[in-house]
Amino acid sequence: MERKVLHLDLDAFFCAVEELLNPSLKGKAFAVGGSPNSRGVVSSCSYPARLRGVHSAMPMGRALSLCPDLIMVPHRFGVYSETSDKVMDILKDYTPLFQQVSVDEAFLDVSDLPQPIGAIARDMQQRIDRELRLPCSIGAATNKLVAKVANDFGKSRVRTGQAPRQITIVPPGTEAEFLAPLEVQALWGIGPKTAQRLHSRAVHTIGQLAELPLAELEYFFGKNAVSVQESARGIDNSPVHSGREVKSISNEITFTRDTSDLPQLLATLRRLSDKVGYRMRQANLMGVVVQIKLRYEDFTTLTRQKALPSPTNLDDEIYAAAEKLLQDNLAPGREVRLLGVGVSQLSEPFQQLELWDDSRSQKEQLAHAIDTLKAKYGKNIITRGSQIEKDRDKNGEKD
């Protein structure tokens, strides 16, 4: 029996929710994100804004230079999360073989349903629109990889300033044919640096990548060569699985003595971020929202959160977001009693598709190597150089 796999992606999800809350935003160029005064970035932008060159992860200042009349809308993560839960509840009605991969994205294996895959996708899309008034696009294929690429391809063809609302179907047996003419970077996991290296060897399309001898693929991708070759040929046997539902992962510490010392707070924030990242990798989870928790000496508690451009479980990326939140929100001179770091909107990463040899992959490989050492020799086997210097300074040590 051929598998029937769907990839569903809510169209400009944050913006779609904001339009429901404020209908006057419909048809206007606006972006959800942080203030340019605090070096904020665009988390999501409306389709009219995209026609003006604005895109996600762009600095908000740059977005305003491209689109001076851009309306800036602050995040409402709680509302987005609640709305996402409602969407996912609808999807779970179709099949228990459901895998949420982000707040606005999920895979479903509907092989057991008797209806044609296109009919299932249309019913799903119409139901979400009818019950929640949210637009979505769906890719349909025999596996997760091709369904994801199909959905991205279908959405990219619509440049009308409106939500795509696409359904893109790749019939069984045509996976390689569908992928072949697409740019090599359309294959999920091949980033700009990898694409440039491939272009230097006259490899521009996924079809050309699929035709490379295994020995040449090993030159580019090392031990991942076979996986890349299969992906380029539209082969993906990874299952759709729900896993256990974890809302967030966090760590916090109550100081022995209240402190307002910024270096101490940052060093503690670093350790907490490392612990959170380690726990996420052990659970095979990634997240897109970083949160800090501050409790002052009078027990006043403050929480602040920041959306990342893409899911992560890397210590450095968690810390960078947490540090900015702390620097932006710490009250000068106030004594801190408790400090915490957390990551939410968790999902499992795609297993067979990695950023094979881009700089991010190197960071991931280093993180996993450190995790292996910690698992074998204990969590304190690795100490950051910055922490050693702090300890030396504290003890009056010098080189």
Image: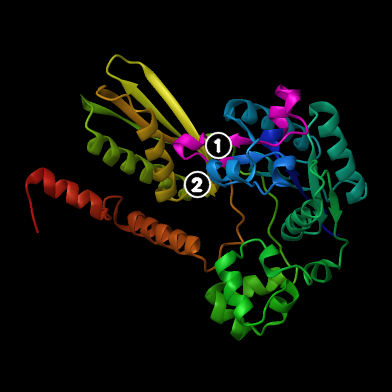
The answer to which quarter of the image holds residue 205 is bottom right
**Camera-side residue: 95 or 389?**
389
Residue type beneath disc 2: Ala
Residue range corresponding to the magenta coloring: 16-42
**Quadrant containing the C terminus in the rendered view:** bottom left
Horizontal placement of 39 versus 22: left or right?
left
**Residue 168: x and y, percent?**
85, 53
**Camera-side residue: 170 or 193?**
193
Query: In this orientation, does residue 11 appear?
Result: no
Q: Are marks 2 and 1 in contact (CB under 8 Å)?
A: yes
The answer to which quarter of the image holds residue 255 is top left
* Residue for point 40% across, 38% down: 324
Q: Which residue is mark 2?
A: 283
**Camera-side residue: 34 or 130?**
34
Crowd tier of the residue under label 1, counting other residues whose Cα lies within 10 Å: few below 14, some 14–19, many 20 or above: few
Q: Which residue is mark 1?
A: 246
